[in-house]
Amino acid sequence: MKKTLLSILYCLAVVAIVSAINLYGVLFEDMHWQHQQHNDTIHLYQDSLQYYKRELVNLRKL
C-alpha cells in the first residue's frame, strides 16, 4: 500500500514538473521551440506512463 502511494505521488510530481516545463515553453519561447517542446512533453508523458505500468505490474507481483 505504501509503495502504491509513493508511486502515485512520484507520478504526480513528474506530471507537475513536465507541465511546468511545457508552460514555460508556451509563455516564453518561439513557435519552433514550442513545437519541439510539445513533442518532448508527449514523449515524457509516454515514458512516465510506461514506467508506471511496469511499476503496477511489479507491485501486483509482490
Image: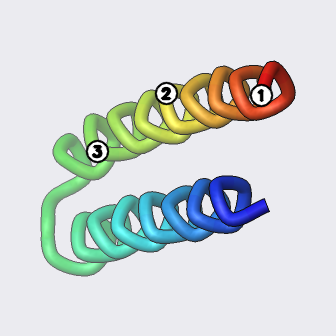
Among numbered discs 1 and 3, the one appearing first in the sequence: 3
Report helix, strand or loop for mark 2.
Answer: helix
- In the image, what residue occupies the spot 15% across and 58% down? 30
- In the image, what residue occupies the spot 75% across and 33% down? 59
Among numbered discs 1 and 2, the one appearing first in the sequence: 2
> In the rendered image, which residue does mark 1 sit on?
62
Q: Amino acid at mark 2?
A: Asp
Residue 47 marker? 2
> 10 left or right of 33?
right
Do callouts 1 and 3 mark residues in contact (Cβ within 8 Å)?
no
Do callouts 1 and 2 mark residues in contact (Cβ within 8 Å)?
no
Q: Nearer the viewer, mark 1 or mark 2?
A: 1
> In the rendered image, which residue does mark 3 sit on?
37
Residue 3 spot, x, y in % from top left: 64, 55
Distance from disc 1 to disc 2, alpha carbons, whole Å, reads 23 Å
The answer to which image quadrant residue 27 occupies is bottom left
Q: Amino acid at mark 3?
A: Gln
- Quadrant in the picture for the C terminus: top right
Residue 38 spot, x, y in % from top left: 40, 44
Q: Nearer the viewer, residue 21 or 30?
A: 21
- In the image, what residue occupies the spot 58% across and 70% down? 9
> 33 left or right of 14?
left
